[in-house]
Amino acid sequence: MKKLALAMVALGLTASVSVAETVTLITPYLAQPGTQMYVQGFEAEAKAAGWDLNVIDTAGDVAAVISRIEDAANQNVDAIVINVDPAQVAAGLQVAADAGIPVIGMDSGTDPLLVTNVTSNGYGMATETSVYVANRIAGQGNVVMFVFDAFPPVQIRGVIADAIFGNYPDIEVIDRITPDVQDGGIADSRAKMEALLAANPEAGSIAAVWAAWDQPALGALQAIEDAGRADEGIVIVGIDANPQARDAIAAGGGFEASVAQDFIGIGSATAAAVARAMAGEEIKASVTYVPTRLITAANVNE
Amino acid sequence: MPSTLSFNGLRKSYGGAPALSDVSLTLAPGRVHALVGENGAGKSTLIKLIAGVVPADTMTVTKDGAPITLNSAGDALAAGFRFIHQELNIVPQLSVAENILLGQPGATRYGLFVDWKALSQKANSALAELGIDDIDVRVHAGGLGVGDQMLVKIASALVRDEGAEAPGLYVFDEPTAALSDTESEKLFDVIERLKKDGAAILYVSHRLGEIMQICDDVTVLRNGAHVITTPIADTSRDEIVHQMTGRELMDGYPPRIQSIGANPVCAAKNISSAKLDQINFTLRDGEILGVAGLSDCGQTEILRLFLGLERALAGSLTFNTSAAPRNPVQAWQRGVAYVPRERRSEGLMMTLGVRQNTLLPHYRGLFANRRAEIEKTRGLETDVKLKAVGPDQVVHELSGGNQQKVVFAKAIAKNPRLLLLDEPTRGVDVGAKFEIYSLIRHLSEGGCSVIMSSSDLPELIGMCDRILILHAGRQYDIIEPQGMQPGDLLATFYDHHKTSELP
Amino acid sequence: MTAHMRQFGTLLGLILIIVFFTVNLPDTFLTARNLINVSQQISMLAVVAFTMTIVMVMNDFDLSVGSMASLSGIVAAVLFSMGYPIWVGVGGALLAGLVGGLFNGFLVAVIGILPFVATLGTLTIFSGTAFLISDGRTIFGRDIPAGFSGFARSGIPLDTIGLEGLKLPYLTITGVIVLLLVWIILEQMNFGRRLYAIGGNIEATRLSGIKVKRLRMGAFALTGIGAAIAGLMYASRVASANPTQGAGLMLDAIAAVFLGMTMGKEGEPRVLATLVGVLILGILDNGLTQMKVDSYIREILIGAIVIAAVATSALGRRR
């Protein structure tokens, strides 16, 4: 009985190898921790499904993503996953579409040429942190925002924060900073924050720092602590809840909240979408959301 | 211990063409041995084999009869061979002391900081060994004159580890090419001293005068083969030239046949510049004006006045009855041609072909006309008697004399009105020199005016109609050199010293 | 004989690479579709590398080409978003390339700053300008006219020569035209030959009455225009403009010229040799991707190949 089961598994394995679906995953951003986790989640599912997976990093070069999509289409793979703004790689998507190959977005953006885009709800995440800040400072005070409008998924977070802060008559956004992200964003954000602190020397003149992702929040935290103004109660929030941010939140300082995306979950949900697309199923929702979670001192250690 | 060095059966071919065929040479301690031959005779190849930088096809080297190996520059250094080249490789930014001790483990304090005092002492003692006491080792080497730079280089060759044997062989490769006569004399004193200390000296030069003066033996090479080795006392200048060239010495300088024209081509009236003072002359068509003086007295600057590179601050400068060109672009367009002093750094694009080098100032129109250019280059090659494989041979493959002919070909390609020559025969062998003299004479007889600066005094006397004597940028005199001896001309350089010392 | 080996070693390398991929990817590498793909993929790098060759002929350098490419895309996109027609956007981008290039040339030739330093400075100036006029945003979507992004997706149909459904991309054609122009400029025009003279010996060239400053400015201007063309091609291909998108072009372009220089008789850059360098880089990228070689290993390999080629050439030259 057992032997038979084993034999069947073995048979199934060989069978799955011989007809293994080939999937190509292309991203310009593999160096970023979040992307690595998407890929990790995706790889786990792909391995379980026995897919022949090729992960390609173009090291920031978007045009190269198009080239690699063309290469993949040329090899007639079964599905392609991209992790880049689809509008920028439309030329490649068209090639894939012409070749009849489904392309699934993994936290990329919405596009008619994509089967679906699997992502966190950026609007939702920004809402959570913006509202957290507004409530913590009781609807009044000066707020510093760190944004990055060049990258659409981050840009929408800023839009939400703008709207929410704008809705409170006593909250004033005194600066809306786009940090230089070439070094990861911490160092430059810190420098920008130091300048702002110098320009607003009185205690209480800055009530909160809202950052569209964690690195500027961490930079602002360092600047505030080094300026000896940690006791003013400046509320700092980020988004993404990366390990460094979690440490800061757990430490109980000014950095109070961030939002955790389920990166691994996005990866596995993308894999699920790929499986459905390869099976020929039609996916109606152009965006597939994976739930997020507000991280504060209360739940950071869970 | 002074030792006798023997180099036997030196053979070297480049791509099947023999550069050196079975040449042997014995260098005795305490003797200066001259190595002469036209460019391409194999002198450079021989030096490269001895230096270990080029592998010989065959070569046996013995030191007092015991064989030694020479497979690398390190072997040559270990054998006590030192090489002083015409192209100085001092580091101009460093001090004299640092240059002298370059490559030596430096004296340090606590193994970390430079011990400047010890450095200066070592450098001074190296210079003292050469009998030199007028070079300050603390100044940066780039500020020294060329002659002193050469002496620094020699001093650096002397430096060795404590207790190590003194170098047994010094090879001088055209050391005086860039030196003035006084500087050369200083060098000869140093060579005399090295010789007295028991070193063997191999002395390579085109200047037969100085060879007759300082050498004990001479070896003549021709076309890569050994012609003769003989004590200097047993030979003569004419004989050496005959052995080198395989032809009789032509009477040195081609005589003027046509007389100078009547029209002034260019004139300087009370010209002063950063480097020049009170320059006055008028040059008529076909006239050859020499510019002479101690080294670096403004000779180059006088030539460069007419290229617009040396700005006149006062006075008037005319060329062809209008103001002189303001930059090299205008100069070439108006028929001024220039043969600069430094062939490699100022005259030629070494990695490009003969054609591109000669025709560079003369390109016209948008597109290149290859066929016409090749034809033109071939014509010029014949005019200057250039020995090259073809119009597109890369210039660095040519010998020094032929490279200089390329520079000349560039200058004469468009029949210039005024030819500016700065050391026109520097580093050029006897045969090529005569060809260059004939060329200059031919141009001048055709009406082209020439201003030439040279440190070769017989050349100035033999070629020039008049010579302008400079001291420290100031015009001292204009003389007619016909019938003059080099010594008389040299004396005029020092006259000025005397007058300037008077109250 | 050995000189020829050295000179053609790089070309031999390219052929070996092609053979290697043909054997290992029998179905997908040496196909008309893939080759057309490669030609399109390398076209932007090629344009930058070809025009980079112009300044490298003079022993100069232009580090600012990548940020100029980004800036040119941004200039065009911003003009598009303001409602100007395509020709104005393209013209504005090319003008930016011309002005930026002239500025580089001015700094190098007239002021006398080392090209490395001068163009490092303008690299950040151009990049900062791109961020400034775009507000750091990626300009995409409706702002980019379909006619502009359509350029990179279209080409001349090749059905007539038996390649059903394939087309010769306009990007490829643009690359070939630039190659032809640069070849004419460098090899056939006196302008180019004077640039080679400057590279051979700038002082000797100046003393020969050549307008060195003006020529150098002209050369840098051409390189700037080349970078702007590549930036437009890139923007068209990604149907968007981002203030950093051209950044990767500079290093690859210099690598391609260096690869090509190993083929020069005297180690000088030649535009056709640069093409070989571009092809090596592009084909490696394409082939190794198809062989599923990890992208980081791919980068290491490409760096190693560039070093190996230049080292072989340097060793060969020493004798």
Image (spheres, coloured by chain):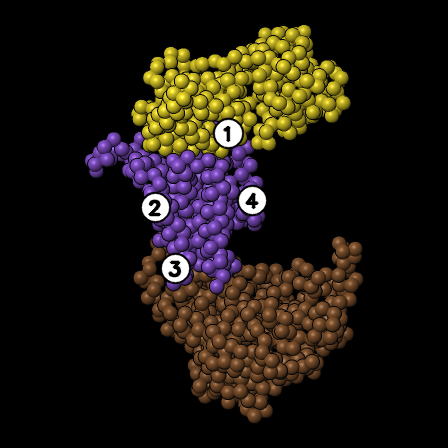
| The hue in which chain C appears in the rendered picture of the protein | purple
Where is B9 relative to C2, above or below?
below
Classify A54 as above or below C283.
Answer: above
Q: Earlier in the sequence, mark 2 or mark 4?
A: 2
Residue at the disc numbered 1 = A30
Chain B color in figure: brown
CB under 8 Å between callouts 2 and 3?
no
Residue B214 seen in this snapshot: no
The kind of residue on which mark 3 rests is His
Q: Is residue C314 left or right of residue B89?
A: left
Of discs 3 and 1, which sits in the foreground? 1
Q: Amino acid at mark 2?
A: Val
Along the line of sight, the residue nearer the viewer: C9 or A221: C9
Chain A's colour is: yellow
**Mark 1 to mark 2 CA distance (whole Å):** 31 Å
Q: Give the quarter of the figure containing the N terminus of chain B.
A: bottom right
Q: Which residue is mark 2?
A: C19
What chain letter is assigned to the residue under label 4? C
Q: CA distance from mark 2 to mark 4?
A: 42 Å
Q: Position of residue B249 (x, y in %)?
A: 47, 87
Q: Nearer the viewer, mark 2 or mark 4?
A: 2
Query: Where is the C terminus of chain B found, in terms of image quarters?
Result: bottom right
Q: Position of residue C1 (x, y in %)?
A: 38, 63
Q: Which residue is mark 4?
A: C118
Q: Assess disc 2: are there few (<14), some (14-19) or many (≥20) residues with their C-alpha within 10 Å of its C-alpha.
A: some
Q: Amino acid at mark 4?
A: Ala
